[in-house]
Amino acid sequence: GAVVSQHPSRVICKSGTSVKIECRSLDFQATTMFWYRQFPKQSLMLMATSNEGSKATYEQGVEKDKFLINHASLTLSTLTVTSAHPEDSSFYICSALNMNSPLHFGNGTRLTVT
Amino acid sequence: QKEVEQNSGPLSVPEGAIASLNCTYSDRGSQSFFWYRQYSGKSPELIMSIYSNGDKEDGRFTAQLNKASQYVSLLIRDSQPSDSATYLCAVSFSGGGADGLTFGKGTHLIIQP
């Protein structure tokens, strides 16, 4: 149980374009999802908490206008990286909160901005 | 500022031996503690969760928690080459991680055949 699907697994885009990443809970409803970012040889850093039907809560230093989060349903949250730049290249990972079990993570999205 | 500290390693352990991974955390009010395993280029995979002081065993893995010392550890018995990975310690202020997790930087474990 507690399967989280993330898509795409890998994306390459040009500087200035926008990229959307999807996170789905497959076998449970997730009122809360989390978005993390991981740079090479670094730990996972929480970017934002996504709550169904309300605005996301962003961590200090994360630009809400650059990283748009939409949690439109109980099984889907999306992260859109707007006007991407090379420094946004990273491994983006989502997780979904299932009240009956600890957090499980999606498979991650490797974003490369050229 | 919530902090989770781990020795980055690498920690090298012979195959069949016990690997011991350690983690300390700064927020005394933390309630939930997790160990994740992460292979290079992959997403973290949950290994163990522990919520109360003492030991919790699951197969070859034992998690140990000491809230007074703000210390949590993971023991891996009969280490196998497939255990070679980065092990991430994660802490949550709430039960089950409802407020998100704070991760350590991870310990790189190498099991030598």
Image (spheres, coloured by chain):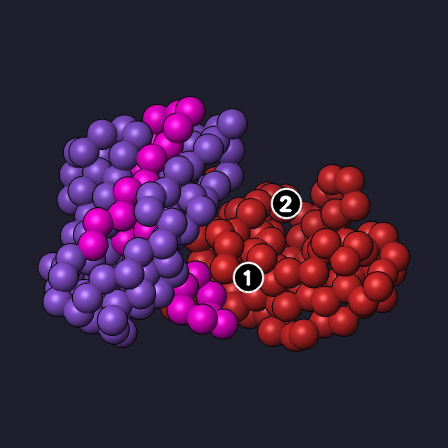
Chain colours: A purple, B red
Q: Main secondary structure of the magenta part?
A: strand
Q: Horizontal placement of A87 versus B22: left or right?
A: left
Dot 1 lies on which element? loop
Q: Position of residue B22 (x, y in %)?
A: 67, 64
Image vertical order of residue A67 relative to residue A4, above or below: below
- Left/right of residue A21 with respect to residue B36 in the rendered view: left
Q: Name the N-terminal-most of marks 2 and 1.
A: 1
Q: Is residue B86 left or right of residue B44?
A: right
Q: Which quarter of the picture shows residue B108?
A: bottom right
Between A7 and A47, which is closer to the camera in this rendering?
A7
| Rendered residue at 47%/66% (across/down) | A43
Q: Pointer 2 indicates a residue of which chain?
A: B
The amino acid type, in three-letter code, at marker 2 is: Met
Mark 2 neighbour class, 10 Å CA radius: few under 14, some 14 to 19, many 20 or more:
some
A42 in magenta: yes
Q: Quadrant of residue A98?
A: top left
Name the spot of residue A38 as percent of width and height, x first: 40, 64
What residue would you read off at disc 1? Answer: B40
Residue B78 lies, in percent from the top left, at 85, 52
Chain letter for mark 1, please.
B
Distance Cα–Cα, label 2 vs label 1: 19 Å
The C terminus of chain A sits in image quarter:
bottom left
Q: Is residue A60 above or below residue B76?
A: below
Q: Nearer the viewer, mark 2 or mark 1?
A: 1
| Residue underneath mark 2 | B48
Other-residue count near label 1 (Cα within 10 Å), few / some / many at <14 / 14–19 / ≥20: few
Q: Percent x, y for residue A8? A: 33, 47
Q: Which residues are magenta?
A: A19-48
Q: Is residue A21 magenta?
A: yes
Using residue B73 as the reference point, say whether residue A10 is left or right of it. Answer: left
State the SS at label 2: strand
Query: Which of the pair B67/A69 is nearer the observer?
Result: A69
